[in-house]
Amino acid sequence: MASELSEGKIMQALDWAYDKAVNGVVGMDSAGEMAANYMSGSGSLIDQANSLIRWQNTKAGTSGFLTGLGGIITMPVAIPANVASVMYVQIRMIAAIAHMGGNDLNDDRVKTLVYACLTGNAAKDILKDIGIVVGRKLTESTIKNISGKTITAINQKVGFRLLTKFGEKGVINLGKTIPLIGGVVGATFDSMTTNAIGNIARDTFIVQSVATESVT
C-alpha cells in the first residue's frame, strides 16, 4: 500500500479533504458547523475545544460515525480509502478548532497551518521555522506575514511527514475493521494520534501564552 502513495498524492488528498471538511458533505456537519455546535456549549473556548477533541477520540472510530463517510471516500486521487477517511475526519477537527479561534478557513495560509497540525507534534518544528510558536495564540498579523513561498515550504514538509506517517507505518497502525456502504474499510483512527493532533491544533489556534492541560 505504501508504494501507492507519494507526496503529490498526499497533498492532493489533503486539498480534497479540506474542501469537504470546510464546505461540508451530505449528512455531515462542516467544520464551521461543528465549531458552532461546540461553541454554543458551556465553559471557556479552551474547554469547548477540549470537548471537541474528546468527541473525536471516543466517537470518530465507531462504525456508526464511519458509515457516514461512505459517500465521500471516493475521490479523484488514487489513494487508499482508509487514508482518505482519516485525513477528512482529522482535518475537519483541526479546521473546526481553527474556526473556533476566529480564523478564516477560506484563507490559504490558515489551510496550510491546518495541514501542519495534521503532523501532530512534528508541527512544532515545522511552524517554528517560520516564527510560529505552538502554545501562543496566532495573531492576524502573523498569519498575514506568511508568504506564498512559505506556504509552499510548509506544504512540502507536511507532505513528506505524512507520506512517512501513512506509508511506512502501515496507514497509522490501524487495528480495526469497520463495515462501510460498499465494502469494508480499515478504520485508521488511532486515538493517541488523534488526541495529539487535536491538542496541537488547540495550542496553535486558541491557547494564548499559557500552559494548558492536554486532553487525555
Image (tube, rainbow, N blue to C red):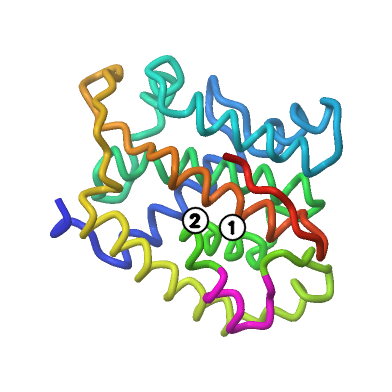
Residue at 72% across / 57% down in the picture?
205
Residue at which label 2 appears: 118
Dot 1: within a 10 Å radius of its alpha carbon, few (fewer than 14), some, or many (20 or more) residues? many
Q: Are marks 1 and 2 in contact (CB under 8 Å)?
A: yes
Question: In this rendering, would 47 be left or right of 56?
Answer: right
Q: Which residue is mark 1?
A: 114
- Going 77% across and 45% down the picture, which residue do you hit? 100
| Mark-to-mark CA distance, 1 and 2 | 7 Å
Which of the image's four quarters has the C terminus?
top right
Residue type beneath disc 2: Leu
| Kind of residue at badge 1 | Val
In magenta segment, residue 131: yes
What SS does tag 1 mark?
helix
Q: Residue at x 84, y 27 (%)?
A: 40
Provide the residue span drawn in magenta. Answer: 124-133
Work out whether residue 145 or residue 189 is closer to the camera in this orientation and state it: 189
Q: Is residue 64 above or below residue 1?
A: above
Quadrant of the rendered structure where residue 82 is?
Answer: top left
